[in-house]
Amino acid sequence: MAKQRMLQFVTVERDMPEKRAAEVRNKDFDEIYQEYAAAKAEEQASRCSQCGVPYCQSHCPLHNNIPDWLRLTAEGRLQEAYEVSQATNTFPEICGRICPQDRLCEGNCVIEQSGHGTVTIGSVEKYITDTAWENGWVKPVVPARERAESVGIIGAGPGGLAAADALRRQGVQVTVYDRYDRAGGLLTYGIPGFKLEKPVVMQRIEQLEKGGVSFVLNCNVGEDITFAEIREKHDAVLIATGVYKSRDLGGPGAGAKGIVKALDYLTASNRASFGDVVPEIDSGELYAEGKNVVVIGGGDTAMDCVRTAIRQGAKSVKCLYRRDRANMPGSQREVQNAEEEGVKFEWLTAPKGFTGDAVEGVMVQRMRLGAPDASGRRSPEAIEGEDYIESADLVIKALGFEPEALPTLWGEEALEVTRWGTIKADFRTHETSLPGVYAVGDIVRGASLVVWAIADGREAAESILTHLNASASVAAE
Ligand code: FAD
Ligand code: SF4
Ligand code: SF4
């Protein structure tokens, strides 16, 4: 077949990979998008206009060299496209699946701004690396030389794993500690399979193990081992523990049975996808089958909960959010997917309380948008006298996450935190107030994105190497 020329956006329309029909996909936890066929990936990549100043690249947190790998894909040079793509991104196939591209690379593609649909950057990125895996181009790390120094990483989410990979490439000995029984952090136990199938994550972890990264799982730092012990064992330490304290709801009946936390609910469902025995699913405590489910919140976690409940066979699924559709934090793409799958959104509503000892209903207050608050967003305010009861036998709270109080939990008061409890780290080097201790990802940024955790992890690895090299040259003097 003739190789594609570029700048085809005028004649070739934007075309995402096929999405499985809602009535088929809402019965399983498989990803909803199919893979591009080779010809389709080449055609879609050829729509890129090869901008001299590519805004897609400057709005990608990893500054991926997008125009180059699009051109190589259009030319059918996939192995080279993969080499370029993996040079700046530790997990391109994961970002291709779950980055909110509409807010990052694709949202800034110039051909979208000129009235043609954006280049489907994320889908092509996924296609390139999925193809690389199929062809055996993704190889375990083999460092040119081994170094004696070791780094301890606390947290096996994307931030910790990206740093682990970058450090191993330089021959550093890396041990990753995690309190869960599987590595991957929210990639494994937060994000559902219909956005990111679990084998995609597990193959990366196996590859890191083959490359010499040691994992110490079921190890809660602060309980099973102290933070001081970890510092003692390693030449540098990276904290990548994410944010796990769920924001809560008050009001009458807030403690009723059947009101559960989003992450407990999603973790149980993800565990079941691995084939684990999950007593809370067997008992129905964290299972939606046959129930009227109400999810409270408007972020991506809420979207994942409503869509999980649909797949578990809920009788009805409603999402209550206190602002309107235009002002919700969750991705519009996910709202559309959820609506297609049967979720009903109740915009401008907030819970006031709950009825029943085992929850039977949510007391709902209707809201309107008032004047902008300090952040510039219009604040929701109650419309007096407009309230009703929404019947519910499972209520899922998805109101966001905050950091745990690490300095207290770890007995390390010298570890400085911000007024929000996130760890204070230098924005460039990622070093904390403790020498030789670095921090990345959500525990520094607050709840954020996978791609930012990867970017931080890669940058922190660079700083750690500089630190190790400086210590090595002092020792040699
Ligand atoms: P995490 O992924 O949270 O990993 C932290 C790890 O540290 C965990 O494995 C945890 O067990 C471990 N840990 C914590 N404390 C300790 C301790 N004391 N001892 C040992 N181990 C510890 N982002 C996107 O870009 N796209 C999405 O579609 C998306 N969907 C999301 C859906 C949900 C439901 C949630 C909750 C988040 C979603 N995010 C999404 C956000 C994204 O998952 C996070 O921003 C990202 O995972 C942060 O990475 P991290 O490495 O900082 O932390
Ligand atoms: Fe876009 Fe995310 Fe890929 Fe960057 S990493 S190019 S933001 S999908
Ligand atoms: Fe190609 Fe769009 Fe990036 Fe320009 S902004 S280089 S057209 S993907």
Image: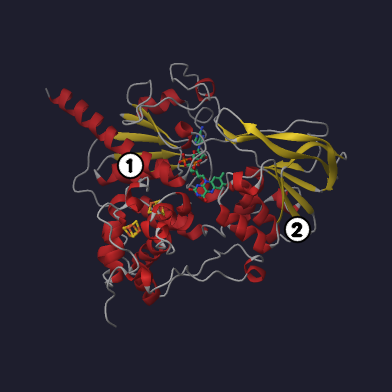
Residue contact at pointers 2 and 1, CB within 8 angstroms:
no
What colouring method underlies this structural image? secondary structure
Task: Tell me the number on the disc at residue 458.
Answer: 1
Q: In the image, residue 86 lies at what x, y percent?
A: 31, 55
Task: Tell me the kind of residue under disc 2.
Answer: Ala
Neighbour tally class for label 2: few under 14, some 14-19, many 20 plus, Cα within 10 Å: some
376 lies left or right of 438: right
**Residue 331 x %, y %:** 55, 51
Q: Is residue 324 above or below residue 239?
A: below
Give me the disc on residue 17. none
Q: Residues within 10 Å of mark 1 (few under 14, many from 20)?
A: many
**Nearer-the-camera pick, 181 or 107:** 107
Residue placed most toward the observer, 36 or 417:
36
> Quick one: SS at disc 1?
helix
Beta carbon of the mark 1 residue lies under 8 A of ligand 2:
no
Tell me which corner region of the image, top left, top right, bottom left or bottom right, holds residue 134: bottom left
Q: Examine the rendered structure and indicate whether residue 305 appears above or below residue 179.
A: below
- Residue 468 position within the rendered picture, expressed as x and y whole percent measured from the top left: 24, 31
Seen at 44% across and 68% down, the residue is 14
Q: CA distance from mark 2 to mark 1?
A: 41 Å
Query: Judging from the image, what secondary structure is the residue with disc 2 in?
Result: loop
What residue sits 41% from the left and 56% below the top? 113
Q: Amino acid at mark 1?
A: Arg
Q: Earlier in the sequence, mark 2 or mark 1?
A: 2
Expressed as whole percent of the image width and height from the top left, the position of residue 84 reads 26, 57
Which residue lies most toward the right here?
356
Would you say residue 8 is visible in this rendering? yes
Residue 314 marker: 2
Residue that protrudes farthest toward the bottom in the picture: 1
